[in-house]
Image (spheres, helix red, strand yellow):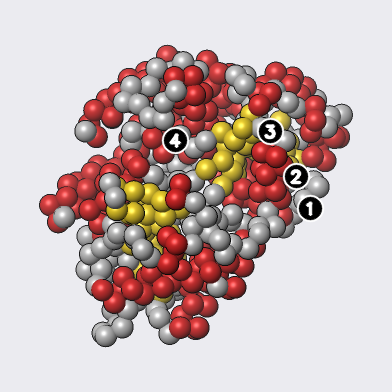
Amino acid sequence: MKKKLVSLLACATVAATLLAGCGGSSSAGSSASAGSTGAAAAPAADAGAGHVYYLNFKPEADAAWQDLAKAYTEETGTPVTVVTAASGEYETTLMSEMAKSDAPTMFQVNGPVGLANWKDYCYDLTGSEIVGNLTSDAFELKDGDAIDGVAYVIESYGIITNVSLLEKAGYKLDDIKSYDDLKKIADDIQARKDELGVKGAFASTGMDSSSDWRFKTHLANLPIYYEYQADGIDSTKEIKGTYLDQYKNLFDLYITDSTCDPKELSSKTADDARAEFLDGEAVFYQNGTWEYSSLAEKFSDDEIAMIPIYFGVDDENQGLCTGTENYWCVNAEASEEDIAATLDFMNWCVTSETGTKAMAETMGFTIPFKTAEESPNAFVKQDAAYTEAGKTPVSWNFTTMPSENWKNGVGSALTAYAAGTGDWDAVKTAFVDGWATEAALAE
């Protein structure tokens, strides 16, 4: 295992260099026990007692996890540290932290591709309480017969819509049922933006590292999904790019009918896009159910809605993009006491009143456990309504993307295309040829 970690750390060094060149940060977020920000702070060992160190993937949920960790420690006496990796830096931070003497006892992988790097460090969860509480074995992440991880949240993403602004422009949600409808309405809003008091139809398609995952990963899921559907597969070593024209059409719409000039997108952040939507400067905003809590502070449930990312392929039957890339794993190299403490903490999060309430109400999660509290998240309810109406959720196939390097290549090509310094052929090359190259390297 140590030999494998040395190899992973070598990759981390390269990844950190690449990310720094893109303006990313390699620092981690907050520590519950240390109460600091900046470099990740591992928990202090307590001789004779188990402790938990959770390396959290979700920056938007950091405060909620800090509170939950504190509540658990107050209830049980078990020390829990939560460190949150900066946006886009999770894998790099995990590699760095795993090399330390006090490594995370609880971490996350994004699915089969992510598991390939970390399966040697995953404790087999077979027979554990948390596995027994899953609503379906479909939420188990397995390596052979071993259960190396469990999904802890099911999420959806689509195009978040300001219903009030849409109605001000003379339209209703029911007027948008296809890509053609979306384009027609967005084009009209963009042409009348001064009259309507907005800066653009869409919030900025930020290609800063805090935001580019929405387009190099989440939007890129659509052409992968439809290709997999057409070919009857669920993974591939060689993507064909059958639906890249539709990908281009939607990306063009995002960057043309926007709050800013496309040349500015390389420096636009996730916070910029959120602020534009919150301030009523944009009608549409591609993001997910995890944004509900921040938006609900400004909007009532009848003022915002999430619609599918209509792709121009099977719009009549398309629902929201629903799935998970969030699997909890336990560090098999931790002490027996720390493993036991971590299993207890994980189980408490999804069974106790305090834990399930925090997951549902504060974090806005739908968790796949029998003891889950129903989420008050309006976007979650809208996803359920689409499914009940017979729409097909778009599965999360981006977990089969061959590597983070592939995503970065696509993101760089998209950024150059938006700025006018690159063409769409470069995006196709990064998407198709880059996939084959990275898939081969992973073998």
Q: Residue at x 56, y 41 (%)?
A: 322
Judging from the image, what secondary structure is the residue with disc 4 in? helix
Q: Nearer the viewer, mark 3 or mark 2?
A: 3
Mark 2 vs mark 4: which is more N-terminal?
2
Mark 3 vs mark 1: which is more N-terminal?
1
- Residue at label 4? 398
Which residue is nearer to you in this view: 5 or 418? 5
For the N terminus, the image quarter is bottom left
- Residue at label 2? 304
Type of amino acid at the residue the image marks with label 2: Ile
- Report the disc number at residue 277: none
Type of amino acid at the residue the image marks with label 1: Ser
Judging from the image, what secondary structure is the residue with disc 2 in? strand
Q: Nearer the viewer, mark 1 or mark 4?
A: 4
Give the alpha-carbon distance from disc 3 to disc 2, as whole Å: 22 Å
Q: Is label 2 in contact with label 1 (beta carbons under 8 Å)?
A: yes
- Residue at label 3? 390
Q: Nearer the viewer, mark 2 or mark 4?
A: 4
Q: Is residue 323 above or below residue 392?
A: below
Q: Is residue 434 visible to the viewer in this orientation of the structure? A: no
Which residue is nearer to you in this view: 276 or 233? 233
Q: Is label 4 in contact with label 3 (beta carbons under 8 Å)?
A: no
**Residue 130 in the image: x percent, y percent?**
44, 64
Q: Is label 1 in contact with label 4 (beta carbons under 8 Å)?
A: no
**Residue 20 in the image: x percent, y percent?**
34, 44
Q: Nearer the viewer, mark 4 or mark 3?
A: 3
Q: Residue at x 29, y 53 (%)?
A: 146
